[in-house]
Image (cartoon, rainbow, N blue to C red):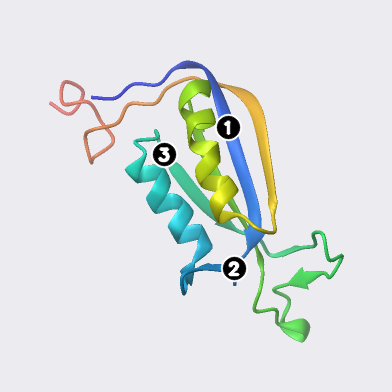
Amino acid sequence: MTRLTGAALRVTIFIGENDTWHHKPLFSEIVHRAHKAGLAGASVFRGVEGFGATSLIHTSRLLSLSEDLPVAIVIVDTEDRVRAFLPELDELVGQGLVILDDCEVIRYAGGDKTGRDKKEST
């Protein structure tokens, strides 16, 4: 069972929903590569409104339906593991913003698909 607690590094990648890598959604490629690299976890969050380097506002409001909403991919693991993954992001993210910040993990326990330790579930 994998456990991650204490000091960690969070990487947040901001891209557009329509960004692609070899005809696949870029956010999906990043998540799959993070998984393959054995990182603790990755989540994708779809924004409802935002703007980036182009200063063009993208929004999900009905009157101005955008097909390229902002997306944030958040990955947390030890600093060494996250920094080892950064070359993958250099390859994948042409336009976007990558932020690193220190964080503290209070509890992460992987391995049991129910999210509970076997001892707790009995």
Tell me if residue 73 comes above or below residue 64 in the rendering: above
Q: What is the C-alpha distance between the residues marked 3 and 2?
A: 21 Å
Image point 82% across, 69% down: which residue? Answer: 57
Which amino acid type is marked by label 2?
Answer: Asp
Give whichever of 75, 122 is nearer the camera: 75
Count of residue discs:
3
Which amino acid type is marked by label 1?
Answer: Arg
Give whichever of 36, 106 is nearer the camera: 36
Tell me if residue 105 comes above or below residue 13 in the rendering: above
Q: Whole-percent x and y of residue 26?
A: 52, 62
Q: Residue tagged by mark 1? A: 10
Give the structural element (helix, strand or loop) at label 1.
Answer: strand
Give the structural element (helix, strand or loop) at label 3.
Answer: loop
Q: Whole-percent x and y of residue 52?
A: 79, 59
Q: Quadrant of the C terminus?
A: top left
Q: Nearer the viewer, mark 3 or mark 2?
A: 2
The local crowd at label 3, few if under 14, some if 14 to 19, many if 20 or more residues have their Cα within 10 Å, is: some
Which amino acid type is marked by label 3?
Answer: Gly
Looking at this rendering, what residue extends furthest in the left direction?
122
Q: Residue tagged by mark 2? A: 19
Tell me if residue 100 comes above or below residue 64 in the rendering: above
Q: Nearer the viewer, mark 1 or mark 2?
A: 2
Looking at this rendering, what residue extends furthest in the right direction?
55
Q: Residue tagged by mark 3? A: 41
